[in-house]
C-alpha cells in the first residue's frame, strides 16, 4: 500500500524522523488555518500518488494569507495525470543548503536489505543511477543484524555528505531503518533529505510503501486504507477482501491465484478478447468469497461475459460452485458465466453445478475452450 | 528418481490439528506419503485420524524419525514454526502459508542460512512438492500428477503449477517431481536450486519452468541455464498482457536491474536456449514434442 506524502511524513514522525512542521487541509479555509499556525512562508502541496506534481502546478510557495488562499484554491480540484487533488499538505517552507537522497528497500536477489544514500538528491534517483552510479553509496544490511549507528556513520562518510550533516544524517538513517523494519515498509524513501543553512537535517519528502501482509500487527494502518483507492470497483473489491485491478475490457475474470489470473488474462487476449479486470480470489477461498467476487464483477457495467477459471489446490472447487450458486441467489447476474473447474474436489464441484447449467451458466473442459466461449459470448 | 523427496521421506505436519492442516495432511497421507506425525503446542498425546500429535517438533522427530515438515500455520506463527522445524532436526521444510510479512521472511531466511545451512526451505506461499506415486507434501491435488517421468516441473505460481501438471498428464507425459517455489519476496528455494537438481537427476530428461512477472529470478535462472543446463527446458511466463502491477517505487527498479516484465523474462530465457511458449497449453504441447523426440 502506497502512502500519500502527508501520511508518509506522519509515519516518519512516529519513528522520530524530523519533517517540516505542517498539516493537511481539505479546504481553502483549512489551508489558511494551517499556514497561520505553522508560520509563513509555507509550501502548498497537492497530495496525489503520482510523480511530477511540481511541473503540473501542484506545489506552490505562499508568503501570506492571500497567496495561500489563491494557491490552495487553484490546486484543490486540479487534475494531475488523471489524479484529482482532494487534499493538500501545508508546511513551513525550508531554506535549503544541500539536497540528499536516502532509502531502504528489500534486495530480493541477495535476500538482504539495501540502503541507498547519495549526496545528489532532489533529482530522480534513476537518473543518478544511470549517469553517475558512483554518486550512490549502496549498503547491504543483514536483516538479522540490522543497522547500527557506527555503520551509519561510516556510510554517510562514504556517501560524502557534507561534514555539517553527517552526524544528524547518521542518526536519522538509523531511525529510518527502524521505520522501514519495525514499521513493515516495502520501501522507505526520502528525496530530498535536506541540510538547511543553519545546519539541521530533515526529510522534505516521504515515499512509503507498506507491506500489507504485516497489517495484522499495525492497527494504525486502518486510516491509510480509507484513503487508498479511487476506482469504485476496486474500492468495493477491497471492502470484500479481494485482490482486484480494474481494466477496460468486457470479460469479467475470476481466478484463484495471481499466476492463474494473469494467465487467464493472457489466454483471453490471445483468443481475441479483452479483460474487464484482474481478480484473484486467493488461496482457500470459500463460497462467501466467490459470491462476493461475482457481485463485484456484476457491478461493472462494461462486463458482457464472466469467465471463472478455477484450478483447486487449497481452494476447493465444491466451495467455489456453492459460491456461484449463492451469488446467483443473492443478486441478478446480468452477464453469462463460463466456468472452467479443475483440481481439488472438481468432480464434486461440477456435480453441484450440473442441475443449474443452461445457456447463461456454462462449463467448459479446458482453459482455452472456456476463454473462446467467453469471448464469443462477450462479442455476441 | 525424484528431487528433494522420495517414497521413504517421513513427514510431520505443523498445524495438523487446524482445518487446513488436517484436510491437506490427510490428503497427503491418502496419496501414499509417509505422514508420521503432527505438531500442535498443547495438543501432544492426541491424534488426528490415527496420526500422533506432539507438542514440539523435537519430540515428533525423536519419536518418528521424520526428516521433512509441512508447515500449515497462520502468517503470524509461520516464521517461528519454520525455525522450530530447523532446530528440531528437520532438513526439508515446506511452508504453504500465504501472507507472511516480507521482513519476517528476510529474517527467517538469513537465520536458516547462518544457523542451519543444511536445511532446505521450500516456500513460503507455495503449493509444495509432489513426486508422483512417491510423495506429496503440500496442497497439490495428487490426481492431476502422473508417475513415471520424464519431466521435472518448477513453478513460481501456485495454481499455474497445477495447470502445468494437468497439461502434461492429459497428454500422458509423466513427471519425476513437481516443485512449486512460490512467488513471495524471499523464497527459500529458487529456480536455480531446482534446475540444478533436475540437471543432476538421471530420470529427468526435460524441464518445464513456469514464471511470472515481477522480480528478476527468471533472468537469473536464464543466465544460469546458459552455462549449466544440458536438458531441454520449456517455459511459460504469466502476465504477458497483465496491467502494470503494483509499482515497486524507484529504489526497487534500480536493484533488480530489470523491468520485470514478461517480455524481458521471455527474451532472457529464449536467449539461453529455452523454448518459450505463450500459454500453458502451448507449453504442454511443446513438451509433448520434446518428449516424443527423446
Image: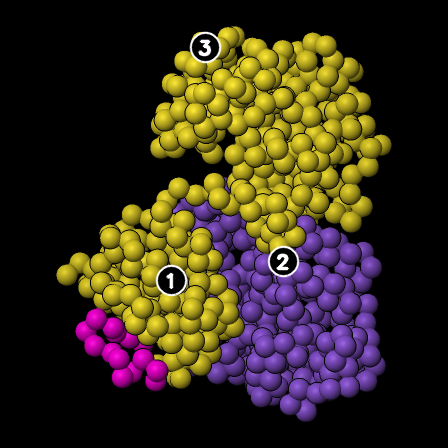
Chain colours: A yellow, B purple
Of A119 and A321, which appears nearest the observer?
A321
Residue A293: assigned label: 1
Q: Horizontally, is A152 left or right of B69 in the view?
A: right
Cα distance in 3D space between marks 3 and 1: 48 Å
Depth check: A235 or B99 in front?
Answer: A235
Mark 3, residue position: A67
Q: Is residue B143 shown to the viewer in this render?
A: yes
Q: Quadrant of residue A310?
A: bottom left
Mark 3 or 1: in front is 3
Question: Percent x, y for residue B6?
Answer: 66, 80
* Dots 2, 1 in contact, CB < 8 A: no
Q: Nearer the viewer, residue B283 or B54?
A: B54
Name the residue that disc number 2 marks. Answer: B100
Q: Looking at this rendering, what residue extends furthest in the left direction? A: A380
The CA span between labels 2 and 3 is: 48 Å
Q: Which residues are magenta?
A: A351-366
Q: Is residue A3 above or below residue A240?
A: above
Residue A172 is covered by the magenta coloring: no
Do circles 2 and 1 both sit on a common chain?
no
Query: Do marks 2 and 3 share a chain?
Result: no
Amino acid at each position: 500500500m502506497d502512502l500519500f506524502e502527508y501520511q508518509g511524513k506522519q509515519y516518519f514522525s512516529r519513528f522520530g524522523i524530523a519533517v517540516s512542521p505542517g498539516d493537511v487541509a481539505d479546504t481553502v479555509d483549512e489551508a489558511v488555518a494551517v499556514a497561520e499556525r505553522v508560520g509563513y512562508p509555507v509550501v502548498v502541496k497537492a497530495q496525489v500518488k503520482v510523480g511530477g506534481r511540481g511541473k503540473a502546478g501542484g506545489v506552490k510557495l505562499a508568503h501570506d494569507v492571500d497567496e495561500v488562499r489563491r494557491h490552495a484554491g487553484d490546486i484543490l480540484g486540479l487534475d494531475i495525470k488523471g489524479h484529482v487533488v482532494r487534499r493538500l499538505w501545508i508546511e513551513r517552507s525550508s531554506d535549503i543548503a544541500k539536497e540528499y537522497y536516502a532509502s531502504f528497500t528489500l534486495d530480493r536477489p541477495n535476500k538482504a536489505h539495501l540502503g541507498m544514500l547519495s549526496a545528489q538528491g532532489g533529482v530522480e534517483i534513476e537518473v543518478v543511477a544511470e549517469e553517475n552510479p558512483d554518486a550512490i553509496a549502496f549498503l547491504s544490511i543483514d536483516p538479522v543484524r540490522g543497522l547500527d549507528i557506527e555503520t551509519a556513520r561510516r556510510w554517510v562518510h562514504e556517501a560524502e555528505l557534507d561534514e555539517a550533516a553527517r552526524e544528524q544524517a547518521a542518526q536519522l538513517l538509523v531511525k529510518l531503518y527502524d521505520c522501514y523494519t519495525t514499521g513493515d515498509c516495502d520501501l522507505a524513501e526520502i528525496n530530498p533529505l535536506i541540510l538547511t543553512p543553519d545546519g539541521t537535517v530533515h526529510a522534505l519528502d516521504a515515499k512509503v510503501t507498506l507491506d500489507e501482509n504485516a497489517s495484522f500487527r499495525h492497527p494504525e494502518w486502518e486510516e491509510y486504507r480509507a484513503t487508498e483507492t479511487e476506482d469504485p470497483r476496486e474500492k468495493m473489491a477491497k471492502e470484500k477482501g479481494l485482490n482486484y485491478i480494474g481494466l477496460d475490457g468486457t470479460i469479467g475474470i475470476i481466478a484463484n491465484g495471481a499466476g492463474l489470473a494473469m494467465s487467464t488474462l493472457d489466454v483471453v487476449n490471445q483468443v481475441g478478447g479483452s479483460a474487464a479486470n484482474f481478480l484473484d480470489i486467493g488461496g482457500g477461498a470459500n463460497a462467501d468469497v466467490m459470491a462476493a467476487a461475482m457481485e463485484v464483477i456484476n457491478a461493472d457495467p462494461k462486463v458482457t461475459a464472466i469467465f471463472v477459471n478455477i484450478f483447486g489446490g487449497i481452494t476447493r472447487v465444491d466451495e467455489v460452485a456453492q459460491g456461484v450458486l449463492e451469488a446467483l441467489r443473492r443478486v441478478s447476474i446480468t452477464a453469462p458465466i463460463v466456468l472452467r473447474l479443475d483440481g481439488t474436489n472438481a468432480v464434486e464441484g461440477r456435480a453441484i453445478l450440473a442441475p443449474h447449467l443452461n445457456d447463461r451458466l456454462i462449463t467448459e473442459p479446458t482453459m482455452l475452450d472456456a476463454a473462446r466461449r467467453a469471448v464469443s459470448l462477450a462479442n455476441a | 528418481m525424484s528431487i528433494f523427496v522420495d517414497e521413504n521421506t517421513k513427514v510431520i505436519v505443523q498445524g495438523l490439528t487446524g482445518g487446513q492442516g488436517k484436510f491437506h495432511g490427510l490428503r497427503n497421507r491418502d496419496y501414499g506419503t509417509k505422514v508420521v506425525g503432527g505438531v500442535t503446542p498443547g495438543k501432544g498425546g492426541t491424534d488426528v485420524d490415527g496420526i500422533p500429535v506432539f507438542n514440539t517438533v523435537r519430540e515428533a522427530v525423536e519419536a518418528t524419525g521424520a526428516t521433512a515438515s509441512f508447515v500449515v500455520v497462520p502468517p503470524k506463527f509461520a516464521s517461528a514454526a519454520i525455525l522450530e522445524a530447523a532446530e528440531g532436526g528437520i532438513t526439508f521444510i515446506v511452508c504453504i502459508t500465504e501472507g507472511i510479512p516480507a521482513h519476517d521472511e528476510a529474517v527467517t531466511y538469513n537465520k536458516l542460512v547462518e544457523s542451519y545451512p543444511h536445511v532446505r526451505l521450500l516456500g513460503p506461499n507455495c503449493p509444495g512438492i509432489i513426486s508422483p506415486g512417491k510423495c506429496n507434501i503440500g496442497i497439490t491435488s495428487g490426481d492431476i500428477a502422473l508417475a513415471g517421468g520424464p519431466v521435472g516441473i518448477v513453478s513460481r505460481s501456485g495454481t499455474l503449477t497445477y495447470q502445468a501438471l494437468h497439461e502434461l498428464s492429459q497428454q500422458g507425459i509423466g513427471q519425476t517431481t513437481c516443485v512449486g517455489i512460490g512467488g513471495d519476496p524471499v523464497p527459500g528455494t529458487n529456480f536455480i536450486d531446482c534446475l540444478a537438481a533436475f540437471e543432476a537427476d538421471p530420470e529427468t530428461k526435460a524441464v518445464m519452468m513456469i514464471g511470472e512477472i515481477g522480480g528478476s529470478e527468471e533472468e537469473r535462472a536464464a543466465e544460469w541455464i546458459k552455462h549449466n543446463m544440458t536438458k531441454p527446458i520449456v517455459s511459460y511466463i504469466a502476465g504477458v498482457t497483465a496491467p502494470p502491477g503494483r509499482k515497486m517505487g524507484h529504489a526497487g527498479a534500480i536493484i533488480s536491474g530489470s523491468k520485470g516484465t514478461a517480455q524481458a523474462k521471455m527474451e532472457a530465457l529464449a536467449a539461453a536456449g529455452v523454448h518459450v511458449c505463450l500459454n500453458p497449453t502451448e507449453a504442454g504441447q511443446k513438451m509433448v514434442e520434446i518428449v516424443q523426440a527423446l
